[in-house]
Image: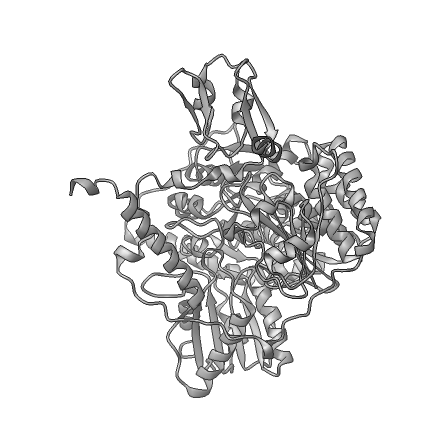
Amino acid sequence: MTRRLLTGNGAAAWGARLAEVDYVPAFPITPQTEIIETLAAWIDGAELAARMVTLDSEHSMITAAGAAAATGVRVFTATSSQGLLYAMEMIYAVAGWRAPFVLVNVSRGVASPVTLESDHNDVLAARDSGFLQLHCATCQEVLDSVLLAFRLAEDSRVRLPAIVNLDGFSLSFTREPVEIPEPGTARGFLPAFDPENVRFRASQPVSQAVAVLGGGPYSYFRYEMHRAAERALEVYDEVSREFADAFGREHRAVETYRSEDAEIVFVMIGSFATRAIDAVDRLRAAGRSVGLVRPRLLRPYPVGALRRALAGKRGVAVIDQNLSMGKGGILHAELASALYGQPEAPAALVSFIGGLGGRDIGPDELHEIAEVTQRAADSGRVPEPRLLYTARELREVRKLQGIAVAERNQTGSVGEGSR
Amino acid sequence: MYRIRLHGRGGQGIKTAGRIVGSAFFAEGYEVQDAPRYGAERRGAPLFATVRASKRPIRERGSIRRPDLVVVADATLIPVASAGVLAGLDERSTLLIASDVASDVWRERLCVAGPVFVLPAEAGERDETGFLGARCAAAVVRMVGVVSRASLEGAIREEIGPLGERAVAGSLSRALRVWEQLEDRSGCVTEGPEDAADVSERPDWIDLPFDPARVSAPDVFGVATSVQVRTGLWRTMRPLIDRDVCRGCAWVCSTFCPDGAIGVDATGAPQIDYDHCKGCLVCVAVCPPHAIRAVPEREAAAEEAM
């Protein structure tokens, strides 16, 4: 085992390498490209015995991934943002094939306007597809989660594809110390894929197809996917315990930090959660009773673990790095449905939306989020969802809008003269 | 925790400089987080790299609010507001500028409260731009004073290694000269204080107002707005056409130019629009009679000024 500085992208590639993947269909997109480049270099240098094929689009890439997985080989692929959205038809379709593989998504906000930096609207667009979702907070977790995701996805009780999500820039391009497991240890944890009845041999041609079905049988297959995803909760607990035994690192479905005796708890996913850990320490040092609860597993949704972790809390601040226009934060809504009617549900569930398109969530903001949530718990009045935005940021935008208007007046827009 | 930010332009080795600093700290037993930060267009465009190093696990992420040290590899970035070179500097932040202008002049020009040092170009060093990143990295590790020369050397070998032995040797010799030059600056940059919750300022959050779509749509309507953006400022290398060698097959260079910055004049000769040429040097590669050569922008600009 060696400890090295790796980017999140490098860690994802190492995960695929240690999983000894057979096939990597690929299409590059910022900020995911380094994963593909790294794997390509290893395959080129005969360090990884896999076949890589570059496809014409993410739509084809996911089709190829699902088709290859349906022949019983181990498949890894990666995308981001617009790529994931472009593949969306096949994301839903291949999940229904029940052919497991691992897709790394490097989170990046979606257009329009265009951004290269991270938020979670891309991966949450795949929320209801049947793909399982693991969300990472560190580069170490990225490597570990790829191995965990293969175990989980390939388990005969589950057999659904899985997404491992890492945040663009703050993980994808950021180097952190990462322990790289020995190949033998990784193989012990993740043996070769046993595809059961999912297989294809060139000498034994078969055709594989899915049928057009009416509501009754259609519902059966969709419900069964749901049952399998639910079953993935207990399978995850099993494999993460095995993982801890093999590698000495524990990745529970829900990570808690100083939350057991906390009155106020932050709930969030992804890499910004490590900043919340810092904020918790600072707030504790200042005498506030604050903790963090971070779901690593988002599909299946670890409803029991979240209820237990949040039972009896006075206030819960859900920090969403996503936005469902006309509704609000997606994690907030999901958590509300999990806690509603529970005997020990927190008194105040407050929604904060921020970190869109790579915008920072500063330490001062995390402190203020705790403060606002405390006040909501004390007063019993829950404030409207807070869109994190400062007067200074609005001034910057007003300045840009001023420039845009001036340019338009100066140069005239297309067709203006004829009107 | 040490919080260090390095500014430069794409192609100047700043991403690599950040990695050298990170690897050197890591070899010294520090926990490290290093990351480059850039937008869609890279070569010649402003970018920065951040390095955090601490004896404890690092959970802080993103931009550095109060840097202990800011390194500026390209002084032309200082007036570029969007580059954010001076962001977060306070009285205990050290500023190091790769420049031949004296540090006193910079301190006065920039009105910064903290110490300012300069890293002059090496005399007679034509190829200095290629090793700027390594020189900056050496300056950083020397100024923090907690990283050994051996760790610096190891980090340079590790990060430059993939570029070949010549690049490693060139980087090492330049870096070690900087290491020697800055001996009396060793330890002048120290770890900054940690934030505390009870002294933190409250964010000036606002309730974002509703704006009608004609204001709040992100569309830009206007004619020829990209002409206004002088992307030529990003150039680190300038393509120069040798008119004696040019055969006037201007359709080759002008077609391959990804920015449409090569036009054809009335005589049929190619003309480079230096306001918009980003210096990608595709034209140098595709010119059939090899009539286009690349000159470091600084030299070309100096010649022009004479």
Q: Residue furthest left?
A: A419
Residue A269, position as x, y percentages in the image: 52, 63
Q: Quadrant of residue B235?
A: top right
At horizontal 58% and vertical 82% (from top left) the residue drawn is A288
Specify whether residue A217 is in view.
no
Q: Position of residue A164 (x, y in %)?
A: 54, 52
> Considering the image in quadrants, where does the C terminus of chain B appear?
top right
Q: Is residue B10 left or right of residue A385?
A: right
Q: Is residue A264 visible?
A: yes
Up-down: is A97 above or below B213?
A: above
Residue A374 position, x and y percent, is: 49, 82
Closest to the observer, B303 or B82: B303
Q: Answer left or right for A378 relative to B102.
A: left
What is the total number of numbered labels drawn onto the structure image? 0
Quadrant holding the N terminus of chain B: bottom right
Residue in view at x 45 percent, y 53 percent: A123
Q: Quadrant of residue B227?
A: top left
The one of A126 and A231 positioned closer to us in this rendering: A126
Colour setting: one colour
Q: Position of residue A359 (x, y in %)?
A: 48, 59
Residue for point 81% across, 49% down:
B151
- Say if A395 sits above or below B102 in the image: below
Looking at this view, name the residue that lies furthest to the bottom: A379
Q: Residue at x 37, y 44 (%)?
A: A89
